[in-house]
Image (tube, coloured by chain):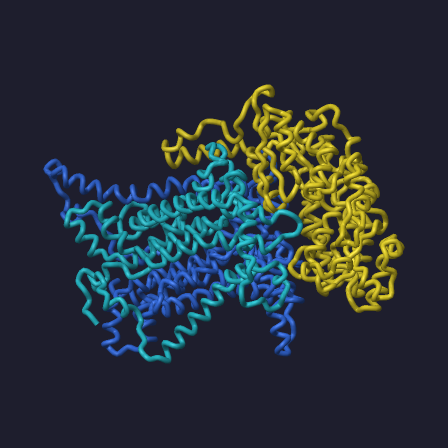
Amino acid sequence: MSETITKPVSPPASRDPAPRNRQKLSLRQKLSIADVRYSPYLFISPFFILFAITGLFPLLFTAYISLFDWELLDDTGKFIGLENYATLLGDDQFWNALVNTVSIFLLSSVPQVIIAVLLAALLNTNLRASTGWRVGVLVPYVASLVAVGIIFGNLFGVQYGLVNSVLETFGLDRINWQNDRLASHVAIAVMVNWRWTGYNTLIVLAAMQAIPRDLIEAAVVDGANAVRRFVSIVLPLLRPTLIFVIITSTIGGLQIFTEPRLFTELPGSSNGGAENQFQTVTLYMYQSGFQYQDLGYASAIAWALFLVIIVFALINFLLTRRIASSGEADR
Amino acid sequence: MTAVTLLGRRTPASRGRRGLTFGDRRARFWVYGLLIAFLLGSAFPLYWSFLVASRDTSILTEHVPPLLPGGNFFANAARVFDTVPFWKALGNSVIVGGVVTLTTVFFSTLAGFAFAKLRFRGRDGLFLFVVATLAVPTQLGIIPLYIAMSDLGWTGTLWAAMVPNLVTAIGVFWMRQYTAQVVPYELIEAARVDGCSMIRVYWHVCLPAVRPAAAFLAMFTFMTSWNDFMWPLIVLNADNPTVQVALEKLQAGYYVDYSLVLAGTTLATIPILIILILLGRQIVAGIMHGAVKG
Amino acid sequence: MRQQLQRAFFGAIALVTACSLSGCGGDEGAGGSGGTTSSGPVELTLSTFGEFGYEDLIKEYMAQHSNITIKHDKVGQGGPYHEALLTKLAGGSGAADVSALEEGHLSDVLSKPQLFNNLEQIGPKDVNKERWLDWKYDAAKAKDGTLIGYGTDIGPLAMCYRKDLLQAAGMPFEPEAVKPLFATWDSYFAAGDQYVAKTGKAWFDSDSQIFNAMQNQLKVGYIDKEDKLVIESNPDIKKNFDKVTAAGGRGQTAKLAAFSNEWNSGFKTGAFATKTCPGWMLGVIKEQSGPELSGKWAVTDAFPDGGGNWGGSYLTVPKQSKHPKEAAELAAWLTAPEQQIKAFKAKGTFPSQVKALEAGELLSATNPYFGGVKDGELFAKMARKVGPAQYKGPGDGQIQENAMSPALQAVEQGKSAAEGWQQAVDAAKRIAK
């Protein structure tokens, strides 16, 4: 991601090559050099200090535990090296969960990002009541999970659900949203997209708001049409933000947990359906850790998922760079 | 159209003509049509919660819900107030959400500025590290975090609910990307030449420019904190809950009275909608866009 | 796990921040406040979920014991409650002095008796086994003899059925007359065939609801006393599985997973004619079916092949408690017959104490929705029919919930019984490993 940085601010001292007589510098200059040199660390340190406790400590904990045969309620575990990881490679349920996860991820993240960019473009036009629209797209995230669970349960209910009733009215067959593997993935993806598209839309909108208006006006003068303006000016300028959206959608999509858990017929179940047909990796991890109490194994699942996510994130990062690279004229 | 103003402060007349524009009425019609459709889909569950809360649970089993609210909302809301310490919980949620939002936005913009625009040893490595930590799922972290909070003696206090959320890696990632996009180096250099210290550059140059992103981060952080349930349930006591923890008690018993539950969630949504509206206004073009070209 | 983690935690802090937080660090004073000796003022915490009916009792207890204050933490649903409880047990602090534990979660903790105080040792001497129904008391005993909890309430099973639907199918329908239908599982499934043939509608809600009841009647469950998985070596389990899936295959199951949205709707639409029915289920049926079906549901004091239990809880005193003796006294007092009868009157929790089952208030209770039946007396009778406690080895509850029930559901959705059985066995092996 660092490629996007083209001209970091360098200390003024470097522009003024090698001041030989340091003692001749005024106090003010010295302070200024110190300011440039140490401020960055000062700026990131509050984050890192707090993050050490709340983010890193749990991470190191899971990494450590993953090397043990450690039950949730035990005082101590037995060191077994990489055995949990070896077991994982031969675990059908893990591979099944991984396939489900990738399937739901593709069905959700891809349309989500595309719709988000288009919707942001619409919201970026001259609209009446613009605040209303912005708040509106974020509203799904406000709705309580209780309500979301009931509503999607009612929508995708197999026997009494609204979607199936509509399908029947049009003479189509009912779809078994719970038990058909692909259908359940589609239903969950709909739920995910419903909850998260507005979030991504606002991110992209915030970035679009920052595009200098005169750039676009210049293009209008040059006679570029709206689509061309969008592709060749707006998208490249959005690159850092698009990288953010795509990387975080990849991470969030592959860690998907809440939606499949809400979607299941059995309240509170982490099983992902009768045949684990929509159990995701994080659901399996949760089930292993908190229900089967195999904390070591669950931690290994967490880190295995980490590796998978890194691979996907890298691929997507490279793709994004290609898609939106034309804007880096100044490189 | 007025010309681009030098200071970048938008004049009232320029307000309407930014971003992509489209002229003819048909396009306008489609844009509003699409947005309205999207908005209806987005808002439906919220409205539907209110429908159930204002009628009774029986509409849950009807295929096509009624379109208009009934008259039971205030009765159901009164039952919520009788059952849970709603105002206290609301106050706690505002405190927790407010503190968490302030710290997250402040520390994220600060670190994001440093990562995006300043040069220092280990910068790229540290930043990649922050992003990479996002890729580890967090559900298992609840146990070590709990142990940490209880060792610090904070369980049972609002501190325990706040501390794990004071900063987020995703906030830093977001602010770094946005700052990289919108804050021109020329502006920073100019401020330095004028004798601004780094912290003043952050405050007077960076922060105003990243306002839309910071507003979004604030909205999202507040909402996430507001809707958080499992963590505050574990670390807080019943007599000092947050809103979600308090509302969960409405689901006691083998049979759940959804009109009561959803009356509670509807009430809890009102403050958050107000915050969204306040912050949503901030997602507008930053103030310095006329100042630098390209 | 706590000590190791403490070291790791403070090590990590020291590494990264050097000093800024050490001021808050070192002390061990996590968690509870309150007195240290039994004579001084003591603050006890009590955590429950759902409705235990203890609110007035707590006031009464505090009035009787001036040195004790009780803080009552109530969570609505059992799911999040037990998740929080497990986190606190794993974390080594923060669990309430008296923590409720649901019967279905017993097998999650019964193999870790070191986490709980043995109530037979620290509890009041005059509280003993005779207070409770045998099976209720025995179920909370770990293999090493530790009694981890005092029983609170139970969910003895009876049969609920739709009077009007049976009548329309030309079958017996009065509570006395239907008893032969519900005498054994064979007669139950035979009656189901008859009902399906007449109406084309389902007899029960789901395979797993029936199977679970049958499974709990077995002498040995999924796991034997040596903590070995016996799902394959205990032929009764497979026999029950085949019986249920065969009946389901003949159209007796409505394929509605318990507590799902569609199951809720199924009560109104009459999707199934009978329901295995613990005492607390009467309230669920009433609310889900709505006033239109008042008097159409009935309950009878019969259950195939004896009896059974679904639900009910215990009060435990975790080792973390700083006041184990006072906590045990409170738990003992709350679970005394006199108190549980008051809880029954307050919230309908059905008592597990022998004396409470003979109390006039319980025996005279009636239920107008179910045609004015004397439900207190009926369920007291069914409570005594429950067989000896089945040993619940580690993972038993998980196998029921995450291996067997999903497999039965898969069969309902079209998997063959043989494949479904294999699925259950594979999943059970993974859980028990």
Q: Quadrant location of the C terminus of chain C?
A: top right
Residue at the spot 72% in from the left edge and 61% down from the top edge: C292
In the drawing, does residue A149 fall left or right of residue A249?
right
Residue at the spot 42% in from the left edge and 50% down from the top edge: B222
Quadrant of residue C115 within the rendered picture:
top right
In the image, residue A145 above or below residue C223: below
Q: Which chain is cyan?
A: B
In the drawing, does residue A240 fall left or right of residue A192?
left
Q: Position of residue C340 (x, y in %)?
A: 72, 36
In the drawing, does residue A182 fall left or right of residue C168?
left
Whether residue B22 is visible to the viewer of this picture, yes or no, is yes
Question: Chain C drawn in what color?
Answer: yellow
Whether residue A257 is visible to the viewer of this picture, yes or no, is no
Q: Is residue C378 or residue C205 the one in the foreground?
A: C378
Q: Which chain is blue?
A: A
Q: Is residue B98 or residue C174 the one in the foreground?
A: C174
Count of marks, rendered view: 0
In the image, residue B48 above or below residue C5: below
In the drawing, does residue A95 fall left or right of residue B21?
right
